[in-house]
Amino acid sequence: MGDVEKTLLEETAAWVDEARAKTERTKKPWGVWIDAELGLRNHWYPAALSRDVEDGGFQGITLLGEDILLARQGGRLFALEDRCPHRGVRFSARPLCYTPETLTCWYHTLTFNLDDGELRTILNEPDSPLIGKLRIKSYPLEERKGIVFVFVGDVAAPPLEHDVAPGLLDDDAVVYCADPYVIEANWRLACENGYDPGHQFIHNWSPFSVKNGIPMSFGWVSNQESVLRTTHYVDDDDGPKGFTRKAAETNIVQEARIPMRDGSVVDVTLPAAEGKTPEELREIAEYAHSCEVGLWMPCMLKVEPWPAEPCIHFEAYVPRDEGSHTYFQFGVMKTRDTAEADAWMNGRAREEWEIPTVEDFTIDDAFARKELQKFYGEEDGWLRERLYRPDIELTMWRKFVTKHARGVQTRDHARGYFPR
Amino acid sequence: MGDVEKTLLEETAAWVDEARAKTERTKKPWGVWIDAELGLRNHWYPAALSRDVEDGGFQGITLLGEDILLARQGGRLFALEDRCPHRGVRFSARPLCYTPETLTCWYHTLTFNLDDGELRTILNEPDSPLIGKLRIKSYPLEERKGIVFVFVGDVAAPPLEHDVAPGLLDDDAVVYCADPYVIEANWRLACENGYDPGHQFIHNWSPFSVKNGIPMSFGWVSNQESVLRTTHYVDDDDGPKGFTRKAAETNIVQEARIPMRDGSVVDVTLPAAEGKTPEELREIAEYAHSCEVGLWMPCMLKVEPWPAEPCIHFEAYVPRDEGSHTYFQFGVMKTRDTAEADAWMNGRAREEWEIPTVEDFTIDDAFARKELQKFYGEEDGWLRERLYRPDIELTMWRKFVTKHARGVQTRDHARGYFPR
Amino acid sequence: MGDVEKTLLEETAAWVDEARAKTERTKKPWGVWIDAELGLRNHWYPAALSRDVEDGGFQGITLLGEDILLARQGGRLFALEDRCPHRGVRFSARPLCYTPETLTCWYHTLTFNLDDGELRTILNEPDSPLIGKLRIKSYPLEERKGIVFVFVGDVAAPPLEHDVAPGLLDDDAVVYCADPYVIEANWRLACENGYDPGHQFIHNWSPFSVKNGIPMSFGWVSNQESVLRTTHYVDDDDGPKGFTRKAAETNIVQEARIPMRDGSVVDVTLPAAEGKTPEELREIAEYAHSCEVGLWMPCMLKVEPWPAEPCIHFEAYVPRDEGSHTYFQFGVMKTRDTAEADAWMNGRAREEWEIPTVEDFTIDDAFARKELQKFYGEEDGWLRERLYRPDIELTMWRKFVTKHARGVQTRDHARGYFPR
């Protein structure tokens, strides 16, 4: 056998190995989760804030890799594929609406219906046979509580409520929206960090903890029986899908020790716990016990109450591309009292929720997500991670998503290969 | 059938699909155009301005992916491969000419003939057997009208005139050169934008139009018969190859309307047309009708007159690499009158051509080319574009190039794999 | 045969060609050198300076693509894989040592032995079955002369002295360390530039030469017999491996001429040689003749004396990743006299070695290495270079390494795929 033949043989072997590896990957009981690098298709997502698209205004966004133009005309908001089918330029580069019903391409005057994306006319070629045939993708859209939700998919859009954590859209929910921002980490890492009971440890470095002298524990840990008892699955056909964890039975680990080589033991104290009496620590833990944390498909977390009554915290990790997500955070109070609602929106939410949470707390979550990205994004971490017992709550989520996801987004979708 | 076998089968199917896709691509009647990402090989190109390579000076440039050193020594200009064959460093990093006949590598003293690239000596090893055998590529070069033209290819270079739009090199052409600059878009997108009759619409936003209150139309549109009548093909064996379009029969679209859902119609007015009488608009169109636009191989556009008599505008989109081209622009007046020529070069060209054209007009072409790049460079736009009727003039060009190109540049050429 | 079949056939042919090319590459007598893009595995490397890791301090470094955390605790220095096996985050992002024996992950409190990398406990899950089983890679480490040496490999680490140029670790060596810095060039290019006898030419532009009026020659060139006589191979099993060249018989080329087309000859003078008498030039050459240059595995160069008695210059080109290395430089004087040693460390080394060498001389080596990177890193220069006679000393080195390397580093190692 010659050199070339030998090399070919070796390369074929390598190819089979690779194919086998892919098979093993798919065999993981949470295969959809591993594949969903660009997000879950056929779901609703927070896409922008209403206040960022004024009447007559535009915003170009990237959602699950798809470039989308938001345009508000004549008081109505529309979401369209941000790519002219003629020669592919982005409308958002120089957006033009000559009427409240239409979007005109700045390059060759192709003019599309804002509502369904169909080519209505071409200003310089009004008799074109393409009119009425060519179309761009238009996205189902709902605007609620100051949030623009967009549906990314090909199937008939289910009710928006099916893809939003319970409570956010309730009539009595007064929603204060923080400015969303982009984080250079895959969206799945954000979901997992947010729900991860062990991640509390990172918040010992958050300004919130340092400023207020509140130790954040070494992690929240539940045993398996407690997880079963305190986790509440919700997967009705007609409603949001997700699950919640009551912290009531969770072990808020406030004490830790390290065994030394010489048989002695070193007690480890959290900086903010220094000087606190056992009673004070118990009080802090008790507050934590009152929290309920929920993770909802496709990518929303709810913590109630947070950081304190009467506030409920919602956040969403919206897939942008393989290496980044947009981070939305909402501070919610429930009331039908107009005066209370006004007070929340015009001062209290800022003081009681945005400063302690958005500015002083979740910045450490953003930090942790970014730190996960190298391993999961470049080093095949999804196959090499070595999970430990508390991670059971994450694998539950992965399997839950694998079971209930309506689809997986691919790069082809992002490039515009979707049914027209 | 096991999992591995199944995966292999699926992958093989994917491979066949991919192969089939390539076949379809090649089947397009303008296959050469699609393949010519790095430019057309065996053609002449504007490479630099004479004034940018003073005597004793150097300029390192990239042309069709090839790194080239321009050196002027003893009053003569040379173009050589900018890569020492010994260990690959660029001469331009520290260019050295110890004699008017030679270029010496700054690293190991290999010394090449400036004229033919042959290794003449090695300063520290003058008896090397490589002398007279090793050589770098030397490029045919002509300097005309203040422009350095370089021939990139392997065949005998045809006369320069064959690759330049008619008129530019004429004895009575007085050529004022603007500073060239790099644009992050493939060169083919520049060619197509420049000749595209529909692209006029983008210039409604150009400072030229806004400042002077000249509406730029919704596009120039010809019907097929008119295109046949007014397009003049030039493909003599002994001369430049290209074609020109007389705008005389072109429909300069100045009026447009959008049909509304309720049966009404919205008239669209160009900002600069606002308040203009039909007569004024007719006058503007008439001027446009007097223009002749020509596209010439490999990559030069000519507009005559532009922006007004007596000026002729030439521009070239010189391939740099897959994602960028160098944009050359020349403002030309025809005269044999020395005083007139001087006036042109020392003031009039600046006022009558460079400011209105280079500074206030073609910046929007640069913008449009860059906007095309994502679709054509990353999203396979060449296969997915949906052309409309006026694009016939572009596909004529694509087919013309496919027929007349002397070759297609590849990455291997750029890496130095050319006959030595 | 259909189009698809034809394409498949062509692609298969291309595949065979590629396989054949790889075979040819491996056939080069210095195959290991060509493959060792990420460095030689199973060797010791300078990794940091002692002064840059204070007690209680940390430094995250990249060595042969591997992310490593250096930590000094309780006066002991440790080197550990900088990647938590749980979810892959880098410890160095927020390094934590709660005891002098342990490193705790900032994310989930996994706590590892600093000395052997074994998981000792998890602060929030002290009963985890992973304890005592999971481990991160710990690296053999030695700290000598203010330099932290780390062993990167899987085999039992040989004595450090086997991987260091002779003399550096001697009891009477007083070692002054310059601040290391990163250079964007593969480490092999640095080795070759450093030992390359022809590279002296580049130093005619170094501030050292210009300031002191010392012409640096057109290159040092030996003939083959002289190389055999003056090169001293050292490959004892029990000691460092490398070889040295005595410059005594080297031709320090100070005169050069270029033959002209008309039969005349142009003498070339080095700028700093201008106005120098032959005697002065002879003196400079004589000094050079007294130098001994040695290259030692895995990546260290020694020049003695340099830049002048009593100083010995050492430098190391430590692989960082495929496209960069860390450049270490050491100025050494031999003495057991404490006062002399102090004078060296506190003033003389700075004046007599660091300023003339690090600041005014080797910056041109850094320049040359970076200029080599495009050809060797992107253009397959290893297979296309056209070596000339003086390069025999480089190919000797390549073959020497191919014979004596203990292993080749791969990307899989860098990603953490090493025996645990």
Image: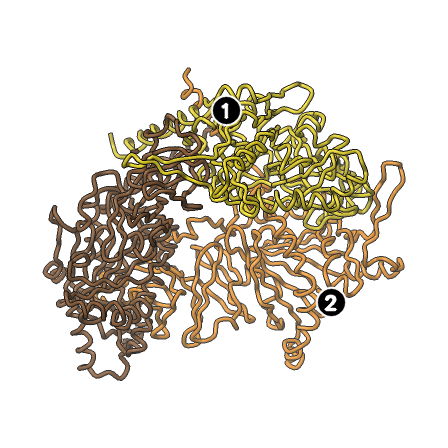
Chain colours: A orange, B brown, C yellow
Q: Is C196 above or below relative to C271?
A: above
- Is residue B42 rendered to the left or right of residue A215? left
Residue A41 is left or right of residue A193, and the answer is left
Circles 2 and 1: CB atoms closer than 8 Å: no
Mark 2 or 1: in front is 1
- Give the residue pinned by disc 2: A308
Task: Say whether residue B4 is visible.
Answer: yes
Q: Residue B178 is drawn in which quadrant? A: bottom left
Q: Nearer the viewer, residue B45 or B347?
A: B347
Q: Is residue A21 visible?
A: no
**Is residue B362 rendered to the left or right of residue C203?**
left
Q: Local crowd at mark 2 within 10 Å, few (<14), some, or many (≥20)?
A: some
Q: Quadrant of the N terminus of chain A?
A: top left
What is the chain letter for disc 1? C
Q: Chain of mark 2?
A: A
Picture residue at 29% right of the left edge, 50% below the top: B75
> Where residue A197 appears, x then y in whole percent?
71, 51
Report whether mark 2 lies on the same chain as mark 1.
no
Q: Nearer the viewer, residue C302 or B25?
A: C302
Amino acid at the residue labelled 2: Ala
Q: Which residue is mark 1?
A: C30
Helix, strand or loop at label 2? It is: loop
Q: Is residue C374 above or below residue A249?
A: above
Measuring from the top left, give residue B266's x and y in whole percent: 29, 77
Q: Position of residue C166 (x, y in %)?
A: 68, 28
Q: Residue furthest top?
A: A1
Number of numbered discs visible in the structure rendering: 2
Q: Which secondary structure, mark 1? A: loop
- Residue A415 spot, x, y in % from top left: 40, 52
Amino acid found under the numbered disc labelled 1? Trp
